[in-house]
């Protein structure tokens, strides 16, 4: 029977909407419709009561929804009105929709008022989604007929104020999204009846005031987003009753060092897992401002003006796994500064002004795997000797001229790109293969197709010739990794050094290379053969020249003898 009714429903849709409708995942999608098409639905589904229907209206022209428009379609489960040009909805528009569970009205800029749209209770309505409309005003009794409403989405409207008592008829709300509106303040009475509230999103409003007791009754709250507002102060009483809070976002506000985080602001939030205070104006992390956060796993304090982090401020963060203090003003890291972070896995200190790190700063951080110190002013590396547990370290964009590569023997991945390397040191260091970790990066990688069309991963390194201290010259060095295995992290790389632009530098290899050895042997054999032939030719030529000289001398001697005997004969004849 249900299958037959579904077929009837589909046929009726085709007949009345002439191809402007489609069916997808049991949802009846109606596009480019008018009010007359809407009335046809009401007339033609009187007999279809045994099948729950889902309607979605897109890009229609429905400036007004009249009374009881769906009165005869009793089994509608969900309705969507997206970009349908709705500006008014009658007080009786959704009467009769006793089985309605989800109502979505979105993308209607002319809908400015949220009011009562039915005079009978919709006891099954669970989700009301009113996103991206033009709603500015909230009628105090707008939610009166939705007693079981659990999810209310009002994001991206123009709401400036939540009237007192607005939620008095919807006590079961668990998810409330008011993001991207124009709300300026949160009063004590705003959420006081929402005892079951779990997720609250107030991000990207204009909130500059929150009553100290605004969240006193919302004790089940787990997620709270206050980012993108104008808050300057977080009082110690704000989150005092939120013992179950797990995620708190305070980023992109105006928190500063003087009126920002109160001492013990999170003292009662022992279950908080993720805290984001990034993109504020804090100069330091106060000694007791993070007290009580014993379950915290992620702390993001990036993009502030933080110049110091007292080790005592981190003393309760024994469960912290990820710390991000990038884009701040740190200049010095002290011994054992992070000693209390016994569960830490990654620390991001990039884009600070760090020039000095004491030797034991990262000592005994057994769980630390990733350390990002890129874009600082480091020239020292002694602290690495006490950080053997780290697997990946990023030292890009610092001030290194030279560094002891043996300090990286225990690391799996090392990024040293964009430092001010001394060319002489770099060439010498690379030539000592035993001192080079297999996956160190000195430059930016690119593909090179060299001998025998074999793919070679190449690093382009810029270095400096400091022999002219007043104006060091810039040179380039090409490091060619001749190991073509795609899983190069599992196999030791072979590297050659190319002082750009040398001609046969790819043939130089720092490890024993059978191909290079064979090639050089062949070259040597041909060279020896050539030398032998040249020597033989020179010898033969020399012998021929000596023979000619001997003959010439012999002929000369014979000539002299003949002349001598001729003269003697003449003398005897005369006498």
Image: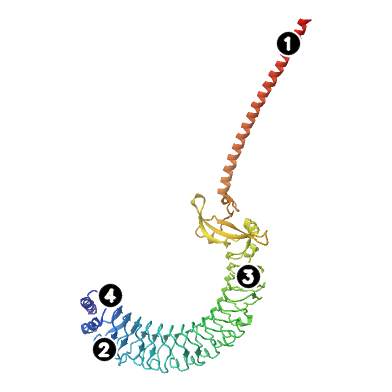
Residue carrying label 3: 377
Q: How much space separates mark 2 and mark 4, taking CA atoms?
A: 24 Å
Which labelled disc corresponds to residue 566? Answer: 1
Write down the residue under mark 2.
68
Q: Residue at x 51, y 59 (%)?
A: 446
Q: Determine whether label 2 and label 4 are within 8 Å by CB.
A: no
Instruction: State if disc 3 and disc 4 touch (CB < 8 Å).
Output: no
Q: Residue at x 43, y 93 (%)?
A: 193
State left or right for residue 207 relative to residue 103: right
Q: Nearer the viewer, mark 4 or mark 1?
A: 1
- Are the residues at dot 3 and dot 2 in contact (C-beta closer than 8 Å)? no
Name the side, left or right, on which 283 lies relative to 16: right
Q: Residue at x 28, y 75 (%)?
A: 23
Q: Is residue 562 left or right of residue 529?
A: right
Question: For residue 338, which quarter of the picture?
Answer: bottom right
- Mark 3 and mark 2: Cα distance apart in space: 70 Å
Q: Nearer the viewer, mark 3 or mark 1?
A: 1
Crowd tier of the residue under label 4, counting other residues whose Cα lies within 10 Å: few below 14, some 14–19, many 20 or above:
some
């Amino acid at each position: 029977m249900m299958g037959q009714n579904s077929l009837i429903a589909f046929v009726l849709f085709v007949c009345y909407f002439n191809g402007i409708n489609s069916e997808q995942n049991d949802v009846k999608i109606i596009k480019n419709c008018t009010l007359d098409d809407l009335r046809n639905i009401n007339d033609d589904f009187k007999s279809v009561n045994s099948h729950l229907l889902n309607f979605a209206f897109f890009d229609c022209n429905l400036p007004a929804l009249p009374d009881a428009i769906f009165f005869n379609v009793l089994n509608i489960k969900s309705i969507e009105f997206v970009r349908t040009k709705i500006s008014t909805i009658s007080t009786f528009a959704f009467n009769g929709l006793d089985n309605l569970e989800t109502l979505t009205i979105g993308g209607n800029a002319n809908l400015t008022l949220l009011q009562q749209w039915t005079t009978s209770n919709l006891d099954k309505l669970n989700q009301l989604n009113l996103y991206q409309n033009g709603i500015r005003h909230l009628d105090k009794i707008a939610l009166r007929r939705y007693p079981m409403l659990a999810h209310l989405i009002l994001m991206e409207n123009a709401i400036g104020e939540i009237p007192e008592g607005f939620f008095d008829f919807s006590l079961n709300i668990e998810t409330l999204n008011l993001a991207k509106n124009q709300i300026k303040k949160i009063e004590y009475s705003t959420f006081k009846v929402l005892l079951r509230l779990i997720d609250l999103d107030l991000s990207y409003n204009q909130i500059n005031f929150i009553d100290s007791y605004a969240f006193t009754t919302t004790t089940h709250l787990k997620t709270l987003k206050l980012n993108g507002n104008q808050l300057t102060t977080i009082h110690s009483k704000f989150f005092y009753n939120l013992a179950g809070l797990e995620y708190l976002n305070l980023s992109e506000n105006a928190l500063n060092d003087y009126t920002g985080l109160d001492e013990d602001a999170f003292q009662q939030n022992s279950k908080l897992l993720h805290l984001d205070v990034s993109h504020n104006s804090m100069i330091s992390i106060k000694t007791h401002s993070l007290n009580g956060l014993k379950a915290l796993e992620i702390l993001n304090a990036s993009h502030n003006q933080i110049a110091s982090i007292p080790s005592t401020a981190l003393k309760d963060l024994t469960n912290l796994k990820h710390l991000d203090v990038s884009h701040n003003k740190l200049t010095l890291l002290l011994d054992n500064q992070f000693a209390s972070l016994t569960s830490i896995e990654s620390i991001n200190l990039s884009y600070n002004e760090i020039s000095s790190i004491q030797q034991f700063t990262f000592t005994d951080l057994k769980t630390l795997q990733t350390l990002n110190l890129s874009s600082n002013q480091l020239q020292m590396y002694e602290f690495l000797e006490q950080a053997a547990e780290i697997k990946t370290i990023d030292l890009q964009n610092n001030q290194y001229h030279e560094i002891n590569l043996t300090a990286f023997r225990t690391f799996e991945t090392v990024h040293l790109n964009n430092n001010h390397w001394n060319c002489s040191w770099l060439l010498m260091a690379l030539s000592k293969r035993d001192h080079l970790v297999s996956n160190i990066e000195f430059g930016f990688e690119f593909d090179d197709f060299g001998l025998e069309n074999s793919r070679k991963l190449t690093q382009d390194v810029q270095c400096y010739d400091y022999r002219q201290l007043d104006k060091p010259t810039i040179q380039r060095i090409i490091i060619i990794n001749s190991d073509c295995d795609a899983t190069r992290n599992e196999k030791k790389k072979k590297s050659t050094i190319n002082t750009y632009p040398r001609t046969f530098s790819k043939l130089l290899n720092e490890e024993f290379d059978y191909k290079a050895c064979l090639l050089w042997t062949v070259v040597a054999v041909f060279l020896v053969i050539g030398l032998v032939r040249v020597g033989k030719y020179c010898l033969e030529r020399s012998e021929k020249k000596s023979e000619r000289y001997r003959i010439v001398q012999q002929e000369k001697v014979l000539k002299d003898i003949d002349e001598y005997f001729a003269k003697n004969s003449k003398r005897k004849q005369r006498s």
